[in-house]
Amino acid sequence: MCRSIKTLREPFVPQVSRADIEAAALQYVRKVSGFRAPAAHNAAAFDAAVAAVAEATATLLDQLVVRGGQQPAGRG
């Protein structure tokens, strides 16, 4: 669905920054909402969605275990 979002887990990316996670979350919310930038009356909902997706993404990356590894994929 979101072809511009890059894979953020090992072995594709050894370390993921908060900026990487937020950029992916922004792209996802833009795609789902259909807005590149929301109107002022939708800005709070848009920003809250980006924050929620970023947090869910960070949690996911922290909990993933790369096959054959002992440690969660994690973030750098």
Image: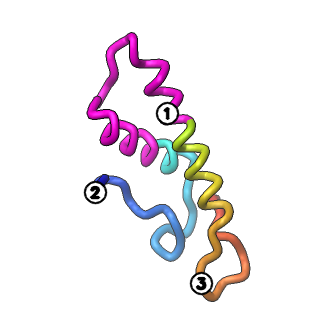
Q: Amino acid at mark 2?
A: Arg
Q: Residue at x 64, y 74 (%)?
A: 65
Position of residue 70 in the picture relative to residue 36 (left or right): right
Q: Amino acid at mark 1?
A: Ala
Disc number placed over residue 67 in the picture, else none = 3
Query: Which secondary structure, mark 3?
Result: loop
- The image position of residue 62, as x and y in percent, is 67, 60
| 49 in the magenta segment | yes
Mark 1 nearby-residue class (10 Å; few <14, some 14–19, many ≥20): some
Q: Residue at x 63, y 68 (%)?
A: 64
Disc number placed over residue 49 in the picture, else none = 1
Q: Amino acid at mark 3?
A: Arg
Position of residue 38 in the picture relative to residue 61 (left or right): left
Q: Are marks 1 and 3 in contact (CB under 8 Å)?
A: no
- The image position of residue 71, as x and y in percent, is 72, 75
Query: Which secondary structure, mark 2?
Result: loop
Q: Which residue is mark 2?
A: 3
